[in-house]
Image: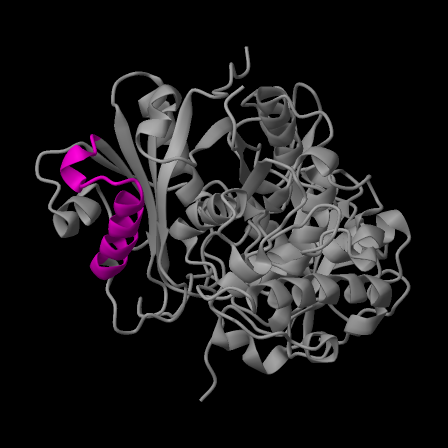
Amino acid sequence: MGSNGIRDRVAIVGMGCTPFTEHWRKSTDDLVLEASTAAATSAGLGYAELDAFWLGTLDSGVSGLTLSKPLKLDYKPVSRLENMCATGSDAFRNACYAVASGAFDTAMAIGVEKLKDSGISGLATGGGGGDGTAAELSAPAMFSLLSPAYAHKYGVAEPELKEVLTRIAWKNHKNGALNPLAQFRKEVPKETIANSPRVAGALGVFDCSGVADGAAAAIIVRAEDAYEYTDQPLFVKALSLTAGPATGASDPGYDYTSFPEVVHCATDAYQQAGIRDPREQLGLAEVHDCFTPTELVLMEDLGFAERGLAWKDVLAGAFDLDGVLPVNPDGGLKSFGHPIGASGLRMLFECWLQLRGQADQRQIDNGRDLALTHNLGGQPGACVSFISVVGTTRD
Amino acid sequence: MSIPKPGPTPVPMSKPFWSATAQGQLVVQRCQGCGTHQHYPRVVCRHCWLTELDWVTCSGDGRVWTYTVVHRPGHPAWEPEVPYVLALVELDEGPRLMTNIVNIAPAEMRVGLAVRAVFDDTADTSLVHFAPVDRPLPTP
């Protein structure tokens, strides 16, 4: 029953990530080529030496041909998959399993999304109509539902909670300002964030992740072969994916102050990785801050803060770049941008840089050698959750 | 020229719900076996998977579980109405609906607010909204 884990069976030996921005002059083909080439090159490999490929994209192409054609991977096994905003992470997960099974020596996981010239400049949202008995909200409205429920349950005044959300956006912009690949590379004053035009509920424009184009890729090999490719591989300690019952908006029982999918996912991932106290053991975490309330709630679901107290930790700076556990040191979805299929692999790219000491101005130096990525797809009450844990040593 | 609001398109499964709103009634499904109420309409009971389901009339009373205020509508037809309140209302019978809260200013919204169903007959299909129980119903 449950998962047997994948600890130390596969390793990442190369990664690449494009800038995330409005790539008006680059196509999906250009982006996958750029990320793939960077990843393969960093592993010292050509495409001919890669055995299998998993491409994650929500809406920028269908089938493995979306990758095989621009990379000219003639007659290689190429799959395309989708798992909402956790798409890139699931591509990585499948590539890891393929190598762990022994079926392939090397595999590439790549995620891409091109949102800006898709005709709607972003993700499609419901346009009304339909049967009319199911809830239909914009993405910011869905996630804004977390705020009143959280404030009510834990007795936080709503203006104070707004301050907490503002600080999360402020922190992620501050981190993004140090990242040459991020979509938004400027610090933003708290007053500007707090007073930005409202979108839904307590959320203003600055509480929402950036809509960007981009791609990111990873090369995976068997753990025992890792040092043949690089002196600094990252070993995969845990991979966990959970899909929830998806009934929160219609059936009683879900309280909108937590993602139960993430709680289950974290339990599984920490067990696989042998983590007892994530706040003390992880060097950094990249989490799915699609909207500021999401990051707040995730701090509790991932065990980084006690239930009902994450808001105090946020205000105290616990998750800042120099905090007890830096969260989203690369700027997160908030300022790195969120090209759906690429985001999960972008999170992993920051772990790749940080744990190998290549993160320049935002380098974290807390002596810890484990990092976590958390990727969420869907909405409160109906989502999938992915967690990976990677580390620098093989136990 | 104003953009017309797209209304619901009832399907066989949900037709009883929309027929009831036209009569000023809020109905949900109830399982003949275990008595569980559910909404949206489904072919099986969410609790025991029995397919024998009745339609029952609700009290129309419920409480706000959480809410949002729409400043940027997902469809241009709602542009003239922003900001408006949407809430997840938990009915006294158990099921939840995402619905408009009318006759209240966004700043007055609270989790736990007691609300009651009201019906909007101005659309082609009569829609169910909710209003605070301690307020006179909005005039049509």
Residue lying at the far bottom in this picture: please name it: B1
State the image coordinates of residue A109 (x, y, percent, origin top left): 33, 39
User: Relative to A62, is B91 on the left or the right?
Assistant: right
Residue at 55% x, 41% y: name it. A373
A254 in magenta:
no
In the image, taking residue A276 as reference, residue A273 lies left or right, namely: left
* Vertical placement of residue A375 versus B115, above or below: above
Q: Nearer the viewer, residue A273 or A262?
A: A273
Task: Name the residue furthest front.
Answer: A231
A183 versus B56 height, above or below: below
Q: Is residue A313 above or below residue A99?
A: below
Looking at the image, can residue B87 be seen? Answer: yes
The answer to whether any part of residue B46 appears in the image is no
Q: Is residue A285 above or below residue A77?
A: below
The magenta span reads A29-51
> Viewer-proximal residue, A128 or A258?
A258
Residue A387 in percent (x, y) is at 55, 35
Taking the spot 47% from the left edge, 29% from the top edge, the residue there is A235
